[in-house]
Amino acid sequence: MKFNKILVLLLTLLLVAGNLSGCSGSKETKSSGKTDQEDRATVTEGETETAAGEASSDSKWEYKEATLTLLTDGEVSLAGLEAVLALAKEKLGITVEVEQRAGGADGDNIVKTRLASGDMADLCIYNAGSLLTALNPSEYFLDLSNEDWIARLDDTFKGAVTIDNAAYGIPMASSQAGGVFYSKAIYKELGLKVPKTWEEFIANCDAIKAAGKTAILGTFSDSWTAQVLFLGDYYNVAAQDPNFAKDFEAGKTKYATNEAGLSSWKKLAETKEYYNEDCLATTYDDGCDIMANGEAGHWIMLTQALSNIYELYGDQVNGIGVFAIPGDDPANQGLTIWMPQAIYGNKNTDKTEDILRFMEFYVSDEALDAYAGSVLPDGPYCIKDYELPDTAYDAVKNDMQPYFNDGRVISALEFITPVKGPGCLAISQACVTGQTTAEESAADYDADCLKQAVQLGLNWE
């Protein structure tokens, strides 16, 4: 009896061992060919792996879990950014925790204080261009110059984030431009062509006015809109005088005494007879309505208005075209562009590898597609060879993109020098409505800029 009990016990142990071996073999078969990375994906009973696990198995991106912090301006729309952050978590395993700060001067002070105190986030969204210099970026931000992927950046944008041959930032969003909106319907009705010179533009305005229509829409109830023509004409100023920005910041040249600079004020003065009679009472919002409904021939505006029009009128936005503010040379017409804010990497953290992984991903086609799929761009992205989605506004993909492809773009002057008179909008409004002459306006603006140059410690006279 004792022998039989022992035999039964041995047989039972052998049976249990066999069952355990069978379970182990079954598990190996189920997970065959899968990496440890893929097995991190959550699997629940009756469900397949999560999208993150599936994406990582065929993605070119290294999947390594990490967490980064990002400080951004609270006034910036986060929809496009959040779309990219979600994709970065899926593809790279990087979770980005977003912290919002105040905008304007208060926000500038927050950024400077946190940099100086060593309390900056891993990633920081801040202006490109002249304001970057004031942050002393070589001390605080990663130099991206030696990264292979930095070559994807548009040269104009790269110049706006480069100091002493070190490039520090990548574009957060799309660009926008100061250009001329035009009604395709009115141009077709009157047989007009997109002008290649200022003289041709004025001829188109004459034809539209003669037809009893508003030639140029003025929305000067919002006075800031009066300065777009002056600011957006900078491409033509630089084309005539390539040293204008440098000499202007140094106080060696002024708008009133520089032929190229004065020409912008002359253009403002010349347009005064083409505006709607109620231009001083017409608002920016009114302008979006008027252009969407083809009730004016032209509107000189920042292309951010495309998104405003789209939100209200949908595909009617594609009845609007855009061209650069014309100069005098038909062979050299180009756009003055407003740079997007840039994303900078904190060099004083222990997360350099993850920051660089994230930044490389952010300028990839995958990430740009995600951004554009959430927020349609107001201008081309500052990324070479990126093909805008079919859903992009016609004015962006058909009208603006060729300027970028051909290298016929320049940053607005405010991205090149910090000298911009705070009275620009009021002075522009006085000029465009005929209250002052071009020469008087130029002299007034020089005096306005002198005050700021003194505040900046520049040696102006």
Image (spheres, rainbow, N blue to C red):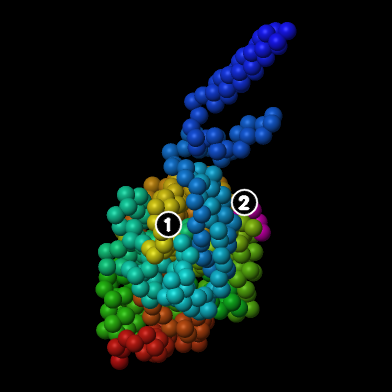
Residue 48's spot in the image, x, y percent? 63, 31
Asked if 443 appears above or below 236 in the picture, the reply is: below
Name the residue at the front extreme: 2
Q: Position of residue 166 (x, y in %)?
A: 30, 63
| Residue 315 belongs to magenta span | yes
Report the label total. 2
Q: Is residue 345 visible?
A: yes
Q: Residue at x 51, y 84 (%)?
A: 426
Residue at point 58%, 62% (across, down): 77
Q: Is residue 83 left or right of residue 354?
A: right
Disc 1 versus disc 2: nearer the observer: 1
Q: Is residue 273 visible?
A: no
- Observer-nearest residue: 245 or 100? 100
| SS type, badge 2 | helix
Using residue 49 as the reference point, say whether residue 194 is left or right of it: left
Measured in 3D between alpha carbons, the distance from the residue under mark 1 to the one under mark 2, in whole angstroms, is: 44 Å
Place residue 264 in its image quadrant. Answer: bottom left
Return the mark for residue 68.
Answer: none
> 241 or 184, which is in the foreground?
241
Amino acid type, mark 1: Lys
| Residue 193 left/right relative to 77 | left
Q: Which residue is mark 2?
A: 315
- Outermost residue toward the bottom? 461
Dominant secondary-structure state across the stretch colored magenta: helix
| Secondary structure found at label 1 | loop
Q: Residues within 10 Å of mark 1 (few under 14, many from 20)?
A: some
Residue 351 is tagged as 1
Residue range of the region highlighted in magenta in the rendering? 312-320
Q: Nearer the viewer, residue 245 or 37?
A: 37
Q: Residue at x 48, y 32 (%)?
A: 35
Of the residues under marks 1 and 2, which one precedes in the sequence?
Answer: 2
Q: Was residue 197 drawn as part of the magenta stretch in this picture? A: no
